[in-house]
Amino acid sequence: MVCFWNAPSGTRLKRNGAEMLKLWGRTNSINVKKVLWMLDEIGQAYDRVDAGMEHGRVNDADYRAMNPNGRVPTLEDGDFVLWESNSVLRYLAMKVQSPLYPADPAARASADRWMDWQLSTLGPAERNLFWGLVRTPPEKRDMAQIEAAAKAAGECWAIVDAWVARHGGPYLDGPTMTIADIVLGCYARRWFGPEVRLPGMPEFPTLARWYAKLGERPGFQRWIAPPLT
């Protein structure tokens, strides 16, 4: 059973004499969500500190000493500090030798490929769709920009839909889930969620079945399924 706390700044909690992981970040950040889901998947205990947006902290000197980008998440594992969410997922998987990050070089490289693609292609394509409809008041929305983002995101998801269909599912690369499914699953929540649906957005039946499979995971239900804010 995963345990987590909103711990005070500077607190290092221990379990069975060993320091627990500390995760800095707010729970409505997509990059923090990735890590929270991963921690559930591997059954890792941790404590969490709210940081970012309304919680502040990210511009404080002690936080910037850990993460000079002033972003979330940041992971502390004893004296080791790591930022960049996809790197955090890789680290957590390797730390416990989780099959979510396959040992086979080709399977691992494929998972890496999709995680890099999220950073380089999917994330930038869909950013204005999420920000425009979820984090921008209706009177300030640029609908032309939002619709362009919906089109760009749809083109990205068409690639994933075709890939899953070609490889047989139910996960990205076939029968076994990897950390790449966690990363893309967080973004798929935006695409399929009612908060960002626009008329005419494609449905992608194969992609929808993949997304539904991810939706069965307790970590998805706990951290990804709740309303977007």
Image: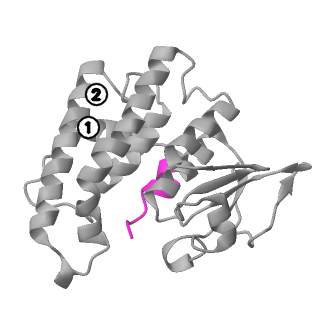
The quadrant in which residue 30 appears is bottom left
Pick the front one: 56 or 18: 56
User: Is mark 1 in CB contact (under 8 Å) with mark 2?
Assistant: yes
Q: Which residue is mark 1?
A: 207
Question: Is 226 a magenta residue?
Answer: yes
Identify whether 217 is placed above or below 63. above
89 sits left or right of 182 in the view: right
Q: Position of residue 174 (x, y in %)?
A: 38, 22
Three-letter amino acid code at the position of disc 1:
Leu
The quadrant in which residue 87 appears is top right
Which span is picked out in magenta? 219-229
Q: Secondary structure at mark 2?
A: helix
Mark 1, Cα crowd under 10 Å, few <14 / some 14-19 / many 20+, is many
Q: Is residue 130 visible?
A: yes
- Residue for point 57% across, 73% down: 59
Q: Residue furthest bottom?
A: 139
Find the distance from the CA under tag 1 to the CA under tag 2.
Answer: 7 Å
Identify whether 95 is placed above or below 175. below
Q: Secondary structure at mark 1?
A: helix
Pick the front one: 223 or 134: 134
Identify whether 52 is placed above or below 37. below
Three-letter amino acid code at the position of disc 2:
Val
Mark 2, Cα crowd under 10 Å, few <14 / some 14-19 / many 20+, is some
Q: Which residue is mark 2?
A: 164
